[in-house]
Image (cartoon, rainbow, N blue to C red):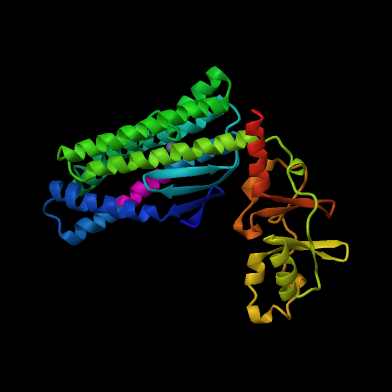
Amino acid sequence: MTRSFRIGRLFGIDIEIDYTWFIVFFLFAALLSTDVLANSLPGLSLGARWLIAGLTTLLLFASVLLHELSHSVVARRSGLGITGITLFLFGGVSKMSDEPKSPGVEFRIAVAGPLASVALAFVFLAIAHVVRPLPGGAIGNTVFTWLGGVNGMLAVFNLLPGFPLDGGRVLRAGLWRAMGSLAEATRIAATFGHALGLLMIVGGIMLFALGAGFRSLWLAFIGWFLIQAAQSSYRQVVLRQAISGVPVERVMTGDVKWVPADIPLDHIVNEYVMRHNHPAFPVFDQDRLIGLLCLADIRNVPQERWAQVTAREATPPLSQANTISPQTDAWDALVRMSAENCGRLLVVEDGLLRGIITRTDIMRLMRHRRELGL
Ligand SMILES: [Zn+2]
């Protein structure tokens, strides 16, 4: 996924922006400039309106970021690994490397965000109240009242009881405590999320048909987005339940085709890649494992040099990025597989190659467990 890019780091948490956020930025700035500011401050010039609208939208962005940071900080205090925050479309997601360990933890993480939004709403409304009598206070009053209102709406929207919205997480925490099963609680909470999404789509289209304007289609769009999110987060929980607790050594492929370090790439392409149809090979120098050679590593070398460059020269060295121990959880293996290690990891113990693990191995495990009703 390269739809987002990093803008910085706060409290050791990577902050990323999804490209969809630029659409939102423009839409909110346009709404503010042409609607809110034009109506309440008709005396402002067009340039001034857009400038104020842009600055206000940045404050909105900071509000959403604070909402997400609140989730992340509580999650981290509860011992969960937070890898980053991505701000997108109508909010953000905190990327957790773990699911909460208990319903209580889930509840606390979920409510932290809306509580931050409510607090922000009060702060902005208070500022609006304070600046109103000042010279030029009308602008500040309009802007901060709007920001207060939007933060209030963010709190209310996020508390709607559909997973993966915060309210859906609160619901899941309650169901989880009542039923004792995270998977079942997630299934029900995600069904609520799905239903809520449908309701928004139908509501948005009906409002539009009744002449409520294009803003009602925005509601339908958010509904569609929520349905996608409900489905994918449910699939992730199911997948996780199916494979966690199984060590890598029980899923890996043990008998691995390898290549010697000193043979040139053209030979590898002709004799190994074409013949064995594998996209990656462990590379050995005598008995010593030196790394994992992926097709992408071969592609990085210009084709006319394939006859001169050896496997040793083209192979990235062994590292955390391409190795894993046989006792590691299969779920962690899946999380760690990326394009960088061509979607596979070398299973290494005491410097010795035990096998190789791929996404396909893990999917096979999942399918078997499901067929066995495990
Ligand atoms: Zn939230």
Rendering quadrant holding ligand 1: top left
Image quadrant of residue 240? Answer: top right
332 and 224: which one is in front?
A: 224
In the image, 164: left or right of 358? Answer: left
Residue 343, image x, y percentages: 64, 54
Residue 206, image x, y percentages: 21, 36
Q: Look at 18% across and 39% down and name the residue there.
A: 209
Image quadrant in which the C terminus is located: top right
The residue at the far right in this view is 287
Q: Magenta region's main secondary structure? A: helix
77 and 351: which one is in front?
A: 351
From this view, report whether residue 54 is shown above or below residue 107. Answer: below
Where are the magenta residues, as a range? 57-65
Residue 124, image x, y percentages: 31, 40
Image quadrant of residue 362? Answer: top right
Q: Is residue 159 visible?
A: no
Q: Is residue 196 visible?
A: yes
From this view, report whether residue 268 is shown above or below residue 37. Answer: below
The residue at the far left in this view is 43
Q: Look at 34% across and 37% down and name the residue there.
A: 154
- Magenta stretch: includes residue 63: yes
- Magenta stretch: includes residue 4: no
